[in-house]
Image (cartoon, helix red, strand yellow):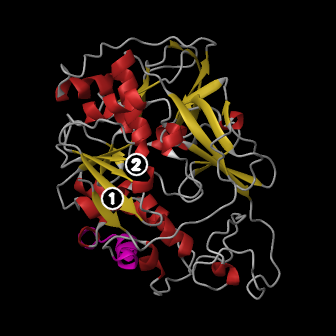
């Protein structure tokens, strides 16, 4: 019998530009890339150089400190370039794709003969292991860890998030196989919405537990779900994966190759005809959506995604591209106007009287960073038993012991993204949390 958990705290940011489920197009790109910057605390070691030929599934780079963790090409072709940033930091390994993809074959045993050790070895060799993330710290999972569970998230509650039922429309068999395999790694928990239960496969692995979450964003965040199902203490770990990524694991087992096709939601107020695009992981963003002057392109959602340009690439974990207006225009007496068209969380503007209305948001902060104002705003949108203001202050002070006591092991930047959105003081909450995680990893390594 599925358990039901109702979250009351949180907030749904209703933006214009929701993807039309009836509009699905095919988007092909000439260039594809895997970006080391998509993975927290990764020190990449290059396995290729410009001019090398690769197949889909061949390694592009690995983790310097865990060489068994590989990151492989989503397509076959020629390595176009290794993009570097400051201090020669590797930003992306770019591959110019062949017209016809050639796949590296993998020896995938049948599910009844698949062992835990064999599955881990296969995922590491194929480059699909990074699909599994680990809490605490929201990093690529440690293959040698013994997690208390693996939590598969079956919905996304972020602004304009894609509908997983559409993302998985043609992957029922692969999803079933992927979840069956993942259940061999640790006790499996599948977290879904009751009104979207059709996304779940008809048959789940023996021992798998289903949990229905109800409530506003961030109900779909893995960290929030783990907090309510199996809170983490010091020394404990949990693994997470999204249902579409579990289907990629299933494809590997069924086909013996890395099939990185994915469906991406093209969303946002500045998108003409928002819908879904069928593409391959790491596609060039400009092939999916149009940018231009006065527009901000985001790989991911508007709360936690990465700012990109048209020649950048889709993030490893992203299945959404959002385009919103740049908020670079001054607004005379903006605070004193009625604000009928402005989103309000605190009932400052009368727009709160229309809860189903969608808004044309932009990037304007409408203020600048200043001292913390302890107003209880954070607690209203964070459905976790964490004291966010005190945790942020402990991070800023570099107090590791206090950070442990206040819940640093349970949070990731995305879990406190709504706190940043609601913040009167314009504090960069996600940046601070990321800084705290980096400090914990450094101090406890």
Q: Quadrant of residue 366?
A: bottom right
Q: Where is 7 relative to 94, above or below?
A: below
Of residue 88 and residue 352, the one placed in the foreground of this image is 352
Res 89 visible: no
Q: Where is 404 relative to 230, above or below?
A: below
Say left or right for 272 vs 172. right
Callout 1: SS: helix
In the rendered image, residue 408, in percent from the top left (x then y), is placed at 31, 65
The residue under label 2 is 197
Task: Please check the rendered image and state whether residue 37 is part of the magenta-colored stretch, yes or no.
Answer: no
Q: Determine the residue positioned at 78% across, 86% down.
A: 337
Callout 2: SS: helix
- How far apart marks 2 and 1 lie (CA) works out to 16 Å
Q: Nearer the viewer, mark 2 or mark 1?
A: 2
Say left or right for 266 vs 403. right
In the rendered image, residue 194, in percent from the top left (x then y), is placed at 39, 55
The residue under label 1 is 225
Res 329 visible: yes
Q: Earlier in the sequence, mark 2 or mark 1?
A: 2
Task: Please check the rendered image and state whether residue 401 is part of the magenta-colored stretch, yes or no.
Answer: yes
Of residue 441 and residue 353, the one placed in the foreground of this image is 353
């Amino acid at each position: 019998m599925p358990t039901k958990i109702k979250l009351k705290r949180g907030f749904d940011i209703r933006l214009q530009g929701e993807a039309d489920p009836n509009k699905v197009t095919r988007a092909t790109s000439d260039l594809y890339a895997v970006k080391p910057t998509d993975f927290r605390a990764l020190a990449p070691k290059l396995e290729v150089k410009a001019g090398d030929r690769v197949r889909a599934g061949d390694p592009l780079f690995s983790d310097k400190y865990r060489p068994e963790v590989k990151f492989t090409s989503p397509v076959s072709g020629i390595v176009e370039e290794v993009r570097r940033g400051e201090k020669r930091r590797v930003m992306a390994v770019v591959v110019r794709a062949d017209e016809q993809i050639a796949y590296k074959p993998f020896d995938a045993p049948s599910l009844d003969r698949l062992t835990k050790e064999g599955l881990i070895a296969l995922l590491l060799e194929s480059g699909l292991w990074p699909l599994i993330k680990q809490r605490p710290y929201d990093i690529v999972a440690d293959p040698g860890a013994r997690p208390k569970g693996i939590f598969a998230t079956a919905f996304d509650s972020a602004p304009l998030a894609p509908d997983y039922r559409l993302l998985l429309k043609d992957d029922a068999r692969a999803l079933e196989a992927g979840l069956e395999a993942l259940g061999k790694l640790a006790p499996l928990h599948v977290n879904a919405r009751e009104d979207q239960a059709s996304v779940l496969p008809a048959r789940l692995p023996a021992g798998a537990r289903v949990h229905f979450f109800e409530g506003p964003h961030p109900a779909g965040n893995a960290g929030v779900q783990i907090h309510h199902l199996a809170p983490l203490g010091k020394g404990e770990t949990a693994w997470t994966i999204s249902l579409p990524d579990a289907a990629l694991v299933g494809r590997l087992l069924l086909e013996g190759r890395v099939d990185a096709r994915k469906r991406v939601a093209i969303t946002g107020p500045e998108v003409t005809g928002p819908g879904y695009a069928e593409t391959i992981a790491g596609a060039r963003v400009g092939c999916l959506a149009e940018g231009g002057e006065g527009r901000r392109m985001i790989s991911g959602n508007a709360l936690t995604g990465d700012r990109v340009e048209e020649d950048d690439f889709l993030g490893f974990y992203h299945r959404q591209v959002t385009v919103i207006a740049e908020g670079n225009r001054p607004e005379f007496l903006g605070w004193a106007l009625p604000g009928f068209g402005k989103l309000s969380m605190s009932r400052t503007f009368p727009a709160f009287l229309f809860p189903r209305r969608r808004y044309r948001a932009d990037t304007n902060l409408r203020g600048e960073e200043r001292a913390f104002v302890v107003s209880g705003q954070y607690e209203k949108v964070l459905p976790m038993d964490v004291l966010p203001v005190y945790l942020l202050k402990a991070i800023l002070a570099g107090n590791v012991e206090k950070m442990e006591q206040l819940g640093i092991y349970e949070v990731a930047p995305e879990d406190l993204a709504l706190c940043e959105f609601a913040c009167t003081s314009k504090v960069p909450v996600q940046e601070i949390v990321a800084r705290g995680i980096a400090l914990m990893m450094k101090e406890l390594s």
